[in-house]
């Protein structure tokens, strides 16, 4: 897997929770370095945007339990293919298993599994990708509220958590967890777990429709395949970045780095509605713009760093990208 990402709905739900809570949304987004267009777009967002969001939310709100408290304002998760898979299943257990098979459609931060024992069962998710405890904690606590609310909605209020384990050591007071989750919470555990009665797995879902279920599974599979293509484009970009200065950035050298044949790479990029030349040109364009706008590197050095063998070729390409010369672009951006 390439860069870790979230579905755009994750950032959007956090943004809506902040608005509902009355906190200054623009200030938090600005501090996090997240543009409003990122919230409104349907593109995947890097996990780093989510991390920055939670750090900014705590700094602006001055609330050390911001994830837990924003969870109370989180809108109900609706309208995504995961919900449709759930509600068209025969019972809660079947819906849960199907949703877990496609959880990556929501976030790469999820790697949840259902564990069923004799007298109890639980969902476990260590959230191993969270790079800092503070981020891990805020995301975990907020996500837990969203998951419990969604499960209650799906089962018409029958789902009840028994207790929760979190994999971080410092958290909110016990009574605050009890107020929000309506169950005890234990900190400092090796995994994050949500325990509940096994009987709820048999709870029938009145919306169940086998015909719709087949269609929803097809759609979810197509979306997973889209994500795999998204991963490939990210891997190609990273391979380009690693070989650009050497002047050996070709389809063949990148394919070799990715351990696939050039023909296969060309086909997969075509299926992702792009091409190697398109990705290479886009990478060079972005890199050139960044170097000219925010560094003092000479134009000759920029030509080299972007992998062009001749300055004249770089100048022609840059004018095609921007309708400006590199010098004109730099003057305008650094003015």
Image: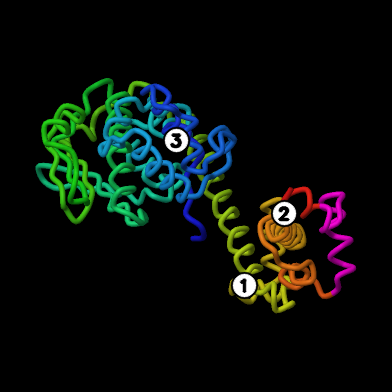
Labels 1, 2: front one: 1
Labels 3, 2: front one: 3
Residue assigned mark 1:
242
Between 63 and 166, the residue placed more toward the observer is 63
Between 326 and 201, the residue placed more toward the observer is 326
Q: Residues within 10 Å of mark 1 (few under 14, many from 20)?
A: few
Residue at x 24% of width, y 28% of height:
203
> Is residue 311 shown left or right of residue 197?
right
The CA distance from mark 3 to mark 2 is: 35 Å
Who comes first in sequence, dot 3 or dot 1?
3
> Is residue 75 shown left or right of residue 211?
left
Residue at x 24% of width, y 21% of height:
157
130 drawn magenta: no
The answer to which quarter of the image holds residue 290 is bottom right
Q: Which residues are magenta?
A: 310-328
321 drawn magenta: yes
Measuring from the top left, give residue 331's x and y in whole percent: 79, 52
Between 309 and 280, the residue placed more toward the observer is 309
Residue assigned mark 2:
274
The answer to which quarter of the image holds residue 278 is bottom right
Residue at x 86% of width, y 70% of height:
311
Mark seen at residue 28:
3
């Amino acid at each position: 897997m390439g860069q870790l990402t979230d579905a755009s709905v994750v950032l959007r739900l956090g943004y809506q929770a902040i608005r509902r809570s009355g906190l200054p949304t623009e200030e938090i987004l600005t501090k996090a370095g997240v543009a409003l267009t990122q919230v409104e777009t349907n593109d995947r967002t890097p996990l780093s945007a989510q991390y920055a969001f939670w750090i900014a939310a705590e700094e602006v709100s001055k609330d050390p339990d911001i994830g837990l408290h924003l969870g109370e304002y989180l809108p109900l998760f609706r309208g995504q293919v995961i919900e449709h898979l759930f509600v068209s299943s025969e019972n809660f257990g079947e819906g849960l298993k199907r949703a877990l098979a496609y959880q990556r459609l929501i976030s790469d931060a999820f790697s949840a599994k259902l564990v069923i024992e004799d007298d109890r069962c639980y969902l476990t998710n260590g959230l191993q990708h969270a790079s800092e405890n503070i981020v891990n904690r805020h995301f975990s606590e907020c996500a837990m509220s969203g998951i419990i609310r969604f499960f209650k909605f799906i089962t018409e209020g029958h789902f009840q958590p028994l207790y929760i384990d979190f994999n971080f050591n410092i958290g909110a007071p016990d009574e605050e967890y009890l107020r929000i989750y309506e169950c005890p919470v234990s900190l400092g555990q090796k995994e994050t777990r949500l325990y509940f009665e096994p009987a709820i797995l048999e709870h029938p879902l009145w919306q169940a429709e086998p015909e719709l279920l087949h269609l929803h599974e097809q759609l979810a599979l197509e979306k997973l395949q889209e994500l795999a293509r998204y991963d490939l484009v990210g891997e190609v970009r990273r391979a380009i970045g690693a070989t650009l200065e050497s002047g050996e950035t070709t389809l063949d050298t990148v394919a070799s780095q990715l351990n696939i044949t050039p023909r296969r790479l060309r086909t997969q990029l075509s299926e992702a509605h792009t091409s190697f030349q398109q990705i290479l040109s886009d990478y060079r364009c972005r890199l050139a713009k960044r170097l000219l706008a925010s560094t003092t590197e000479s134009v000759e050095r920029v030509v080299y760093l972007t992998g062009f063998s001749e300055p004249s070729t770089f100048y022609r390409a840059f004018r095609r990208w921007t309708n400006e010369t590199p010098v004109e672009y730099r003057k305008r951006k650094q003015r």
